Image: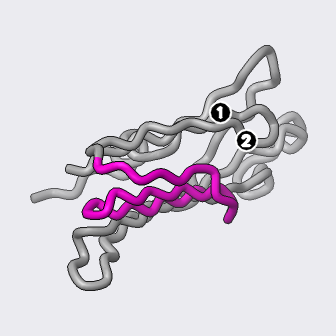
């Protein structure tokens, strides 16, 4: 079976940032995505999903820069989900932004980051 293309996988799995109000749009770029089954005794009972992404540097873009010269503010979002116990933890840049304990098969959580960026994580257990 063929692996899904990275662009399709990222589109389905990444936190969804958007801008609020009439602020200046800053393009988003992906750095890394990992999904690991990490249960202590049975691997498939706990999942750790990590997204690394950044918002482009608007000054570098305005100056016509390209590639790594345009890298700007970078972030790390990690979701740890124990499917058996229902414990769910979402960290943004190492800080806890969400914790819940529910056996529901879906996580749907959004929050506002610095810079008025709204991120949303939607995940399904299956």
Q: Residue at x 43, y 37 (%)?
A: 108
- The number of numbered badges drawn on the structure is 2
The one of 110 and 65 positioned closer to us in this rendering:
110
As helix, strand or loop, the secondary structure at mark 2 comes to strand
Residue 6 relative to residue 20: left or right: left
Residue tagged by mark 2? 113
Residue 9 at x, y = what percent? 35, 48
Is 96 magenta? The answer is yes
Residue 26 at x, y = what percent? 74, 34
Q: Quadrant of residue 63?
A: top right
Q: From this viewpoint, which residue is outermost toward the top?
A: 22
The one of 3 and 103 positioned closer to us in this rendering:
103
Q: Residue at x 30, y 77 (%)?
A: 39
Check disc 2: other Cα within 10 Å, few if <14, some if 14-19, many if 20+.
Answer: few
Determine the main secondary structure of the stretch shown in magenta: strand
Q: Earlier in the sequence, mark 2 or mark 1?
A: 2
Q: From this viewpoint, which residue is outermost toward the left?
A: 1
Q: Quadrant of residue 90?
A: bottom right
The one of 32 and 115 positioned closer to us in this rendering:
115
Residue 7 at x, y = what percent? 40, 45
Quadrant holding the N terminus: bottom left
Is 10 magenta? The answer is no
Residue 53 relative to residue 36: left or right: right
Q: Residue at x 60, y 58 (%)?
A: 91
As helix, strand or loop, the secondary structure at mark 1 comes to strand
Residue tagged by mark 1? 118
What are the residue bounds of the magenta stretch? 77-103
Residue 59 relative to residue 124: left or right: right
């Amino acid at each position: 079976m063929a692996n899904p293309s990275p662009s399709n996988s990222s589109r389905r799995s990444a936190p969804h940032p958007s801008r609020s109000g009439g602020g200046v749009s800053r393009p988003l770029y992906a750095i890394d995505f990992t999904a690991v089954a990490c249960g202590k005794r049975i691997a498939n009972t706990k999942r750790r999903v990590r997204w690394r992404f950044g918002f482009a540097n608007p000054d570098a873009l305005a100056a016509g820069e390209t590639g790594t010269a345009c890298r700007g503010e970078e972030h790390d979002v990690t979701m740890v989900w124990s499917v058996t116990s229902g414990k769910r933890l979402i960290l943004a840049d190492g800080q806890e932004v969400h914790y819940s304990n529910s056996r529901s098969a879906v996580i749907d959580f959004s929050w506002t980051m610095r810079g008025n960026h709204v991120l949303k994580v939607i995940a399904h257990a299956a």
